[in-house]
Amino acid sequence: MSYSNENQLLVEPVAKLIEQFGRLPGVGPKTASRLTFFLLRAPEEQTKALSEALAGLREGVRFCRRCFNIAVDELCVYCASPNREQRLICVVEEPLDVLAIERTGSYRGVYHVLHGRIAPLEGMNREDIYFDELIERVRNEPTEEVIIATNPNTEGQATAFYIQRALAPLGVRATQLARGLPTGGDLEWADPATLGSALEGRREF
């Protein structure tokens, strides 16, 4: 019996929630079902808290108008901080990568979050991420260095190459994280010591 056929045997609210959980990244049919039935058995206060948290995610969170990191105001905490080096921009693929770099304690600049990477086989091209916004930002803001901290895999490296090529005519210094990060991995899973060393030992393209 297929997953969709199984859902037809369930009452509609349960089937709908399983379907929505199943659309989340990394959540398969079995996990979606387990999460749904866990919530059915959970105290009302827990399900209510989850519902309120999900509603608050859409109502109280936005993307920073400058760097596209998550924010509650027009600017994120890093872009708005007078204690950050605003001329130093670290380019990452996802907001979780910002948290990974912050855990190192080695970086005092600001960020630019692409929200993806260039991966034509997955239907992700330059216009599908905040690529052109980065180039326009560097063109219009005083910028001393752009650290390209895309993930050390094929798509991340290709994205870094395209960014470096687009930045070259602007005359800004472009660097990349040093080797030492595991090839094929994601920044969010790197331990702070390794990531900190890669950041401090960054190299020119």
Image (cartoon, helix red, strand yellow):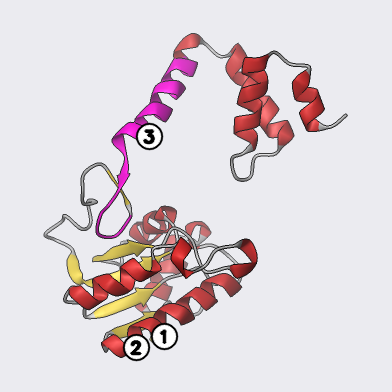
Q: Which residue is drawn at 32% across and 56% down?
A: 68
Residues rendered magenta in the picture: 46-68
Three-letter amino acid code at disc 2? Ala
The foreground one among 184 and 121 is: 121
Q: Determine whether 38 is above or below 127 in the image.
A: above
The foreground one among 112 and 170 is: 170
Secondary element at image label 3: helix
Q: Does the magenta stretch include residue 92?
A: no
Does the residue at mark 1 contact the one at mark 3 (Cβ under 8 Å)? no
Q: Determine whether 66 is above or below 87 in the image.
A: above
Q: Which residue has dot 3 on it?
A: 57
Does the residue at mark 1 contact the one at mark 2 (Cβ under 8 Å)? yes
Q: Which residue has dot 2 on it?
A: 168
Three-letter amino acid code at disc 1? Arg
Three-letter amino acid code at disc 3? Leu
Give the mark, 2 or 3, whose residue is nearer the N terminus.
Answer: 3
Does the residue at mark 2 contact the one at mark 3 (Cβ under 8 Å)? no
- Residue 160: percent from the left, percent from the top? 46, 77
